[in-house]
Image: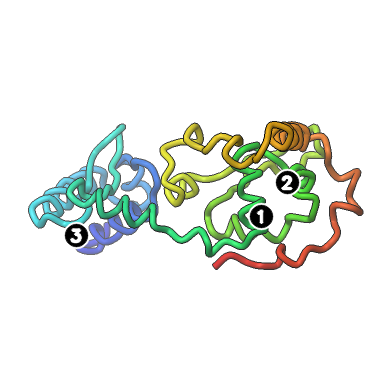
Amino acid sequence: MPSDVTLRGAIEALLFVSDEPVPAARVAKILESDTTAVSEALENLAGEYREAERGFQLREVAGGWRLYTHPAYHEAIEQYVLSWDTRRLSQAALEALAVIAYHQPVTRGGVNAVRGVNSEAVISSLIEKGLVKEAGRDREAGNAILYTTTRAFLEKFGLKSLDELPPLEEFAPDPITEKAIRDRLGGSRTQVASDGEDLARSHEDDVDEID
């Protein structure tokens, strides 16, 4: 069994990388430690953070433990998140991200069909940035990988959910253009690799990696 100091440090490390509540029993199993000792360490850490008025808190929720930012600093955190500079994304990356956001889950072929160019490089960049993730396979499109946006996407763009995405009308200058955008989004899933040669043509913007 690890020492008290080592145990506490290991618990903090696990909670730091977790994006959901972790039960004490699971922490104990991972660290090969006693569940009672882990529970006591969690309680002690939560108390220490609370008494020291740290910028984060350790809370027991939904049957597990998770680190949260301190409510007192939520306004500053919100300003930081909303001030994230989306201009660091290339035009190509923004285009691909928009298609994925509005049409998810969508295959790379679907993104290609809407953009009219190969989007492999920019999708890889968006994945590295944590804004897009793989989300299964589309059997109707040759078992192609499906992509969706991530929780980080919502955080970076200041959205509570995908329901808060701006309506397409804000991007279309007239009803005809709006309909064209909707038609391309709606039909992109069927326009896949059969158009391969045309879709695979190179595009200089596609190699503009996001920072």
Residue 9 horizontal/vertical position (percent)? 26, 61
In the figure, is residue 139 to the left or right of 128? right
**Label 3: few (<14), some or many (≥20) within 10 Å?**
few
Note whether 151 is above or below 126 in the view shown: above
Residue bearing the label numbered 1: 123
Mark 2 element type: helix
In front of the other: label 2 or label 3? Answer: 2
Q: Residues within 10 Å of mark 1 (few under 14, many from 20)?
A: many
**Circle 1/circle 2 CB separation < 8 Å:** yes
Element type at mark 3: helix
Q: Which residue is mark 2?
A: 111
Choose between 45 and 91: the one closer to the eye. 91
Q: Earlier in the sequence, mark 2 or mark 3?
A: 3
| Quadrant containing the C terminus in the rendered view | bottom right
Q: Earlier in the sequence, mark 1 or mark 3?
A: 3
Callout 1 secondary element = helix
> Depth-wise, is mark 1 or mark 3 nearer the camera?
1
- Check disc 1 and give the amino acid type: Ile
Numbered label attached to residue 41 = none
Rendered location of residue 132, percent (x, y): 58, 49
The colouring scheme, among rainbow, by chain, secondary structure or one colour, is rainbow
Q: Residue at x 31, y 32 (%)?
A: 62
What is the distance, in whole Å, between disc 2 and disc 3 at their CAs? 51 Å
Closest to the observer, 107 or 101: 101
Out of 90 and 63, give the one closest to the viewer: 90
Q: Which residue is mark 3?
A: 4
- Tag 2: amino acid: Val
Mark 1 or 2, nearer chain start: 2
Q: Is residue 85 above or below residue 60?
A: below
Q: Is residue 74 left or right of residue 200?
A: left
Q: CA distance from mark 1 to mark 3?
A: 44 Å
In the image: residue 92, left or right of residue 165? right
